[in-house]
Amino acid sequence: MAVELVPRAAVIKQVVDESLDVKSLVFEFADGSELSSLPGQFIEVSIPGVGESTFAVSRLEPGARRFHVSVKRMGHVTKALHRSAAGETAFVRGPYGKPFPVGEWKVKDILIVGGGIGLAPLRPVVDHILANRADYGKLDIVFGARTPGDMIFREDLAAWGNDAGIKLVKTIDVECVDWDGCVGLLPNVVKQQGYRSDGSIAVVCGPPIMIRFTMAALKELGWPDAQVYTTLEMKMQCGIGQCGRCNIGGKYVCKDGPVFRLDQIPASAM
Amino acid sequence: MAGWKQLAKADLPAFLAELAGQAELVVPQEKDGKVRFGPFDRSKPVSFPSSLVDVSLKAVFFPKRRPIARFDSADKAKLEPVAPETGPRIAMGAHPCDVAAVNYVDRVFIHSAFKDPLYEAERNRTTIIGMFCSEMKPECHCTDRELSPDDERGMDAVFADTKDGYLFRAVTDKGTAVLNSALLKDTTEAPEKKDWPKGKYPVSPECVVHSPSSLDSDPFWQDVSDLCLTCGACTFACPTCTCFLVSDEQHDGKGERVIAWDSCQFTGYSRMTGGHNPRKSAAARVRNRMLDKFVFTVEKYGATSCVGCGRCAIICPVGRHFPKEISALSAKAKVR
């Protein structure tokens, strides 16, 4: 039996510049195997001698061989990944964690709220809905970034903006020339837009503080906790419920999450 | 259940030599006044402590540093998994608390969705010849943690130190296989049953059920953490603490991916890359560890994870006394 913590070689097929400090790396396993990830699941990516970090799968291409991670330049591992080029090898294990229950959301309207790099784990949800468009109701996407230069997934944003079936709202934190979207913090924009719960599903991800205030905004708009999902950020390392650091009470974010329905989140997390 | 067999005190060295002939033998060893488990050395006499080996048995199965894969610093496109050890091994002289602790650690690494084959191989290749305690040391409180100094659960074989010699008994088939020496003589004698004292640091079930949310804002957490250095010594001394760090180490052109002990008491343990730290204060980390032992592990594995060895209190450099603290917390919870 293989040691789960020993990853498999994966070749970087493409590097996409997303924003000033975010790059997406497109991988394929060196042995040609598939990544059986579901929207919301994460993987561990490492470079020998540098270290290993946790990343949401930000896209699984049709055929399940090519997968993307979107990396914000922050620490040692992310800096090393930013220096990587197509053709180089990194190491990947996973997928891990509980995915978004997209199967349970059929027929319903979906509201996606992403803040900054928090859009990365949500993009596979959008991809899933677009690939199964007839199964879902209306799709609202709200995406916020600090400045226009921090907007990631520009091609997707353009495509979503042109899709008659999607209502896309983009916002930045402070006013800026040549900006045609909203200005304001995500929780306020969510309130202004007045999204109605009416049996819909809201999916929220971003920095911890943005999640907290967006949850409050949704509550104010009358959203019941059982209709709101998030994917929590905690320091994860093993990804398999053993190393200990991502616990919230008796739950591990890596194993019992990272996707949680708001009414099922351990109280101390919010 | 097999009967007891006697070993004359004078025959101990010969018996140990026999065991060392059939397997790698691990026994308690003294160095600079501290006793820990290590490889048997024929040239050194072995003495089995009457209770509590200073350093727990945990490290025999879950060492403080364990390579899981190797790489060449010049060719980082290859990561070679480390093969599990398979040769037979005997670990002798661990007391009931330590054996119970290893059985708890099994829940994390074996009875888990992702089994750790390296840990499991260490468990499978090892026969545990445990030992009854003949006394309880000042900080011992296993009797308050559903154990006793003569509890043989989890052992493959057990022995007791008596006035006239040692009494051995097999508990499992693995244990029977290592007790086949001609030096062991059948006997009708059995270790003396003692009435062990209880109640030193009791923890009530009410604590386990009620303490987490109802005591969250209690000044208790600040009180107990005021002196804490968050040095992590208690977590390293604890036979059931299993938190680890995965990291890469490189020396002389060779690299290893290593699993090393980590501690939930360290400031940076749960700090995320962006700087957000859900357990920034010492009080939050102390609370996390105390409740983990008695509440969270019940949720995760259906069992509390303190075996009452008292090592956390013995090792603490500022005299924090975890067993007294958890007992006080439990009493508080009971009152509410």
Image (cartoon, coloured by chain):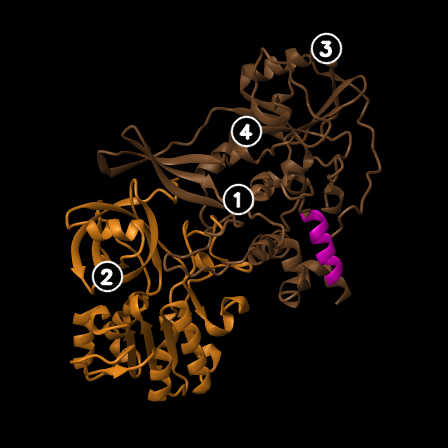
Chain colours: A orange, B brown
For the residue pair A126 and A33, the one nearer the viewer reads as A126
Mark 2 is surrounded, within 10 Å at the Cα level, by few (under 14), some (14 to 19) or many (20 or more) other residues, namely some
Cα distance, mark 3 to mark 1? Answer: 39 Å
Is B182 situated left or right of B136 in this image? left
- Residue A190: give x, y in percent of width and height: 35, 83
- Element assignment for label 3: helix
In the image, residue A231 sits, relative to residue B169, either above or below, namely below
Mark 3 or 1, nearer chain start = 3
In the rendered image, residues at marks 1 and 2 fall on the same chain? no
Cα distance, mark 3 to mark 4? Answer: 26 Å
Q: Which residue is mark 3?
A: B10
| Residue situated furthest right in the rendering | B195
Cα distance, mark 4 to mark 1? Answer: 19 Å
- Residue A97: give x, y in percent of width and height: 40, 59
Q: Amino acid at mark 4?
A: Thr
Quadrant of residue B180 within the rendered picture: top right
- Element assignment for label 2: loop
Does the segment drawn in magenta span residue B236?
Answer: no
Tell me whether the residue at label 3 lies in contact with that at label 1, contact meaning CB atoms closer than 8 angstroms: no
**Residue stretch rendered in magenta on the structure:** B322-332
Tell me whether the residue at label 4 lies in contact with that at label 2, contact meaning CB atoms closer than 8 angstroms: no
For the residue pair A191 and B157, the one nearer the viewer reads as A191
Residue in the image at 74% along x and 13% along y? B8
Quadrant of residue B184 within the rendered picture: top right
In the rendered image, residues at marks 3 and 4 fall on the same chain? yes
Cα distance, mark 4 to mark 2? Answer: 50 Å
Tell me whether the residue at label 4 lies in contact with that at label 1, contact meaning CB atoms closer than 8 angstroms: no
Q: Which mark is residue A21?
A: 2
Q: Which residue is mark 1?
A: B242
Cα distance, mark 2 to mark 3? Answer: 72 Å
